[in-house]
Amino acid sequence: MVQLGQRAGRGPASLAEIALEEDLPRAYLEQLVMSLRDAGLVHSTRGARGGYELSRAPGKIRMSEILRALEGPIAPMVCASEDAEHAVICDRSSRCTVNVLWVRVRDAVTGALDSMTLADLIPSLGVSPAMPAQSIPTSTLTGALTRT
């Protein structure tokens, strides 16, 4: 996605180019791009100059969207999944005393991912890695983990 973001507005990029640039197997990228396409984050163009490009500007694509497209629901434990079906998987979730911890961890991670866009990871568009656009204060994460 960062490769596509760097090429935004310059036409489609082939998976062969991205595979070479990122030193990744093309077959692996083909699997990833299917999930990204199904989520509406990229679209493809066929033909000799075809390939993939972002469906929206990098600044309009939240990192949480990308992670959900590639990995599924954001949850440190199945009992903290955003998916309502988690209760079927774990019958203890309604009486679990640790569930509140995992839900808060999930919410902190989701908040961090929602606060960043793909543009934040593109050096020419975002902020340098040494100075993140938005960071979550340690006290916020600590508070999320220690509140009872």
Image (tube, rainbow, N blue to C red):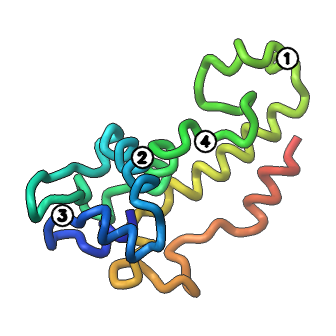
Mark whose residue sits in front, 2 or 3: 2
Secondary structure at numbered mark 4:
loop
Residue named by callout 1: 92
Instruction: Tell me if residue 98 can be seen.
Output: yes
Q: Amino acid at mark 4?
A: Ile
Instruction: Tell me if residue 5 can be seen.
Output: no
Residue 127, above or below 147: below
Q: Amino acid at mark 2?
A: Gln
In the rendered structure, the answer to whether residue 125 lies left or right of residue 51 reads: right
Residue named by callout 2: 31
Mark 4 or 1 closer to N-term? Answer: 4
Residue contact at pointers 2 and 3, CB within 8 angstroms: no
Mark whose residue sits in front, 1 or 3: 3
User: At 51% across and 50% down in the image, what residue appears?
Assistant: 67
The quadrant in which the N terminus is found is bottom left
Nearest the viewer among 133 and 90 is 90
Q: Count neighbours of disc 3 (C-alpha within 10 A) and say few if under 14, some if 14 to 19, many if 20 or more.
A: many
Q: Amino acid at mark 3?
A: Pro
Residue named by callout 3: 12
Q: Image quarter for residue 122? A: bottom left
Percent x, y of residue 105:
74, 47
Mark whose residue sits in front, 2 or 4: 2
Q: CA distance from mark 2 to mark 4?
A: 20 Å
Secondary structure at numbered mark 3:
loop
Q: CA distance from mark 4 to mark 3?
A: 29 Å
Q: Count neighbours of disc 1 (C-alpha within 10 A) and say few if under 14, some if 14 to 19, many if 20 or more.
A: few
Residue named by callout 4: 74
User: At 59% across and 49% down in the image, what residue appears?
Assistant: 110
